[in-house]
Image (cartoon, rainbow, N blue to C red):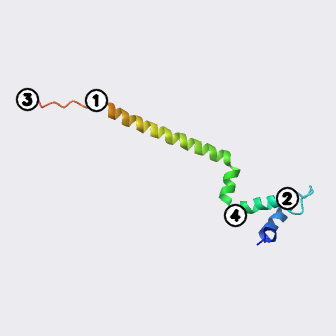
């Protein structure tokens, strides 16, 4: 189906025209605009991610730093345990 014949796209175009009637709204969306609306409709999660990319980038950066910090602490503890001298074991003393 041609996107210009899609009733949902026509409904969205009508809603976009009704939002700002004071300006001269285009009679139809450009091909690029129509493709963007259609893509956003088909991929809502990706569209949300693109709109909120700053938030997502911050969360991913924080998670990465936290994971690296946990990894470094665990690695340091394992290294200390490996390098620590073993406890001395002595024979029992009888008096």
Label 4 and label 1: CA atoms lie apart by 62 Å
Q: Which mark is residue 94?
A: 3
Disc 3: CA contacts within 10 A as few (<14), some (14-19) or many (>=20):
few
Upstream in the sequence, badge 4 or badge 2?
A: 2
Q: Identify which residue is drawn at 7% across, 29% down.
A: 94
Upstream in the sequence, badge 1 or badge 2?
A: 2
Q: Which mark is residue 42?
A: 4
The answer to whether the residues at label 3 and label 4 have Cβ atoms under 8 Å apart is: no
Q: Identify which residue is drawn at 62% across, 43% down.
A: 58
Image quadrant containing the N terminus:
bottom right
Disc 4: CA contacts within 10 A as few (<14), some (14-19) or many (>=20):
few
Upstream in the sequence, badge 2 or badge 3?
A: 2
Upstream in the sequence, badge 3 or badge 4?
A: 4
Residue 73, x across and y down, in percent: 44, 36
Label 3 and label 4: CA atoms lie apart by 82 Å
In this view, which residue lies farthest toward the left?
95
Label 2 and label 3: CA atoms lie apart by 95 Å
Q: Which residue is mark 1?
A: 85
């Amino acid at each position: 189906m041609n996107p210009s014949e899609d009733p949902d796209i026509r409904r969205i175009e009508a809603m976009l025209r009704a939002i700002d009637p004071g300006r001269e709204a285009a009679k139809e969306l450009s091909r690029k605009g129509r493709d963007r609306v259609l893509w956003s409709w088909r991929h809502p999660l990706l569209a949300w991610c693109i709109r909120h990319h700053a938030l997502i980038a911050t969360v991913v950066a924080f998670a990465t730093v936290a994971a690296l910090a946990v990894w470094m602490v665990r690695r340091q503890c394992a290294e200390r345990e490996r390098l620590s001298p073993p406890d001395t074991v002595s024979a029992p003393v009888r008096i």
